[in-house]
Amino acid sequence: MSSRRLEAVRFAESAHGRRVDLSKDVVIDAVERFLEACYQDAGAAPEKLDGDQVREIALTHLPRRCFPKEPFVPQLGAILAAFFDHLEETTLVPQLFEIRRTLADVGARIPEAVRSVPDGERRGDDSPRKPIRRPSDKVGRNDPCPCGSGKKYKQCCLKLGS
């Protein structure tokens, strides 16, 4: 289990996570996307953020990671506020007052920001892409030529290619 998923599960199982009126899996999904936006887009852990960074994540980066019809989108502001309440109990958050003011200001605007992102700009799965593979094995210089002449590749088609 990744550290982001573990952090999201800890929140969902806390009193603050249960305060959100959504299923545990939906809350975990929402918090994981927020954490991905924190670490990948802002380059900082959520407890290291300030109000301006939270505003940028909430209105710019997080909406690109969500789709309007997902069940947590209308409550993203409340989920983030509950998440920072949870962080206050588990770790030191130096800019917590500023973050709470920012979330109170932008919390209701997050669903509209999600709806306003064009589908082409949404980030889907960030998992690594599989490498492109050759359909057949690479022909070595001393291998028989694939043309079927019976000669070595270096004496046949390799010379024709250069």
Image (spheres, rainbow, N blue to C red):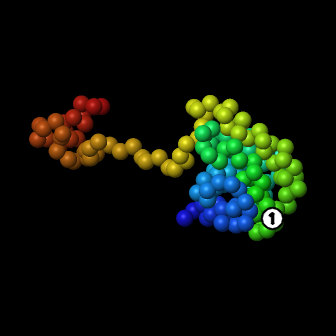
**Which residue sits furthest left?**
150
Left or right of 129 in this view: 54: right
- Foreground residue among 53 and 67: 67
Q: Please name the residue shown 81% across and 48% down the image.
A: 103
**In which quadrant will I find the C terminus?**
top left
Q: Secondary structure at mark 1?
A: helix
Q: Is residue 88 above or below residue 150?
A: below
Quadrant housing residue 17: bottom right
Quadrant housing residue 112: top right
- Foreground residue among 15 and 40: 15
Q: Position of residue 114 (x, y in %)?
A: 67, 37
**In which quadrant will I find the N terminus?**
bottom right
Kind of residue sitting beneath label 1: Glu
Q: How many marks?
A: 1
Q: Position of residue 122 (x, y in %)?
A: 60, 37
Q: Position of residue 19 (x, y in %)?
A: 73, 60
Q: Is residue 68 above or below residue 85?
A: above
Q: Please name the residue shown 71% across and 47% down the image.
A: 75
**Which residue sits furthest front?**
21
Mark yes or no: residue 25 visible. Answer: yes
Q: Please name the residue shown 69% across and 54% down the image.
A: 21
Which residue matches tag 1?
88
Q: Please name the residue shown 32% across and 43% down the image.
A: 134
Left or right of 28 in this view: 85: right
Q: Position of residue 156 (x, y in %)?
A: 18, 36
